[in-house]
């Protein structure tokens, strides 16, 4: 993978993660919360967190000398 491609994908994942956070907050502020939709949003957010970590590791690998 090209570094610029990884950086672009990382920024996109971070943006989506922030958007999901806002959507979860908005959904939980409703008087009646759709628990299935809430669970799906949280699961997607966790996936993105893991994906962000993976991208960061590939962008800045730990090199043991």
Image (cartoon, rainbow, N blue to C red):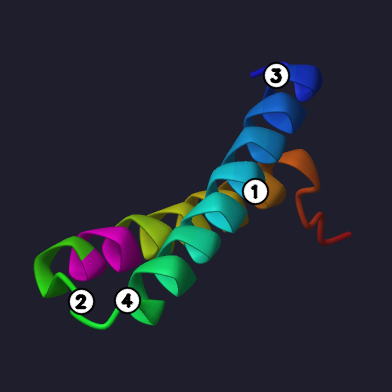
Residue 32 is inside the magenta segment: no
Q: Does residue 13 lie above or below 21 as drawn? A: above
Report the residue marked by disc 4: 30
Report the residue marked by disc 3: 5
Q: Secondary structure at mark 3?
A: helix
Q: Residues within 10 Å of mark 1 (few under 14, many from 20)?
A: some
* Label pair 2/4, CB-CB below 8 angstroms: yes
Of residues 40 and 25, the one drawn nearer to the viewer in this rendering: 25
Q: Earlier along the polypeptide chain: callout 2 or callout 3?
A: 3
Q: Earlier along the polypeptide chain: callout 4 or callout 3?
A: 3
Q: Nearer the viewer, mark 1 or mark 3?
A: 1
Report the residue marked by disc 1: 14
In whole angstroms, how far apart are the C-alphas of marks 4 and 1? 25 Å
Residue 42, quarter of picture: bottom left
In whole angstroms, how far apart are the C-alphas of marks 2 and 3? 37 Å
Residue 28, quarter of picture: bottom left
Q: Secondary structure at mark 4?
A: loop
Segment colored magenta: 38-43
Badge number at residue 33:
2
**The N terminus is located in which quarter?**
top right
Q: Earlier along the polypeptide chain: callout 4 or callout 1?
A: 1
Badge number at residue 22:
none
């Amino acid at each position: 993978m090209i570094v610029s491609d990884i950086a672009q994908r990382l920024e996109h994942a971070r943006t989506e993660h922030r958007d999901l956070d806002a959507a979860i907050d908005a959904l939980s502020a409703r008087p009646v919360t759709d628990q299935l939709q809430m669970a799906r949003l949280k699961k997607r957010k966790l996936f993105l967190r893991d994906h962000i970590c993976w991208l960061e590791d590939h962008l800045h690998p730990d090199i043991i000398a």
